[in-house]
């Protein structure tokens, strides 16, 4: 089951529970990351079976945010003229599609 779902694991360097995305769980566990033994701040256990869907969703969001941060920024329009030309082009395309 390890690696199939996102999980909270204890970071051995900090001693804190961290959300680990599903694709990284097995690798983290192989280098001493372990399941938390205590309760979360809300009094519920970490990695509870009733919370797995929420944990997986949070893991998917974490992974997606990493991918967005890693993506190169889109090239910015260099001049106001280029931006205005783009707007006119879209308006022309919209008119033609009517």
Image (cartoon, rainbow, N blue to C red):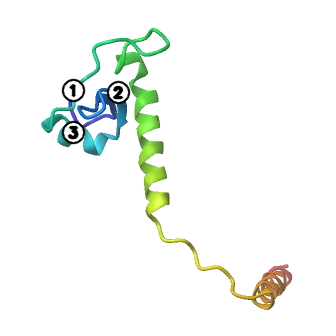
Rendered view: 32 above or below 35: below
User: Looking at the image, which residue is at 45% across and 44% down?
Assistant: 62
Rendered view: 38 above or below 31: above
Image-based side of 92 in relation to 21, left or right: right
- Between 43 and 89, the one nearer to me in the picture: 43
- Between 18 and 84, the one nearer to me in the picture: 18
Quickly name the residue at label 3: 28
In three-dimensional space, the C-alpha distance between marks 1 and 3, rounded to whole angstroms, equals 8 Å
Decide which of tag 3 and tag 2 comes sooner along the chain: 2
Rendered view: 52 above or below 45: below
User: Looking at the image, which residue is at 44% across and 62% down?
Assistant: 70
| Spot occupied by residue 19 in the image (x, y as percentages of width and height) | 37, 34
Does dot 1 land on a helix, a strand or a loop?
loop
| Category of crowding for the residue at label 2, using alpha-carbon neighbours closer than 10 angstroms: few (below 14), some (14–19), many (at least 20) | many
For the C terminus, the image quarter is bottom right
Decide which of tag 1 and tag 3 comes sooner along the chain: 3
| Category of crowding for the residue at label 1, using alpha-carbon neighbours closer than 10 angstroms: few (below 14), some (14–19), many (at least 20) | some
> Which numbered marker is on residue 34?
1
User: Looking at the image, which residue is at 34% across and 21% down?
Assistant: 47
Q: Quadrant of residue 91?
A: bottom right
Decide which of tag 2 and tag 1 comes sooner along the chain: 2
Image-based side of 1 in relation to 64, left or right: left
| Category of crowding for the residue at label 3, using alpha-carbon neighbours closer than 10 angstroms: few (below 14), some (14–19), many (at least 20) | some
What is the total number of numbered labels drawn onto the structure image? 3
For the N terminus, the image quarter is top left
Quickly name the residue at label 2: 17
Image-based side of 25 in relation to 73, left or right: left
User: Looking at the image, which residue is at 46% across and 51% down?
Assistant: 64
């Amino acid at each position: 089951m390890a690696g199939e779902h996102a999980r909270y694991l204890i970071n051995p360097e900090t001693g804190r529970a961290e959300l680990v995305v599903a694709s990284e769980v097995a690798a983290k566990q192989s280098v001493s990351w372990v399941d938390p033994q205590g309760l979360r701040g809300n009094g519920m256990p970490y990695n509870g079976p009733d919370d797995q869907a929420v944990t997986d969703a949070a893991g998917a969001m974490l992974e997606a945010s990493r991918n967005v941060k890693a993506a190169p920024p889109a090239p910015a329009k260099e001049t106001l003229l280029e931006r205005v030309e783009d707007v006119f082009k879209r308006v022309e395309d919209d008119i033609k599609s009517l």
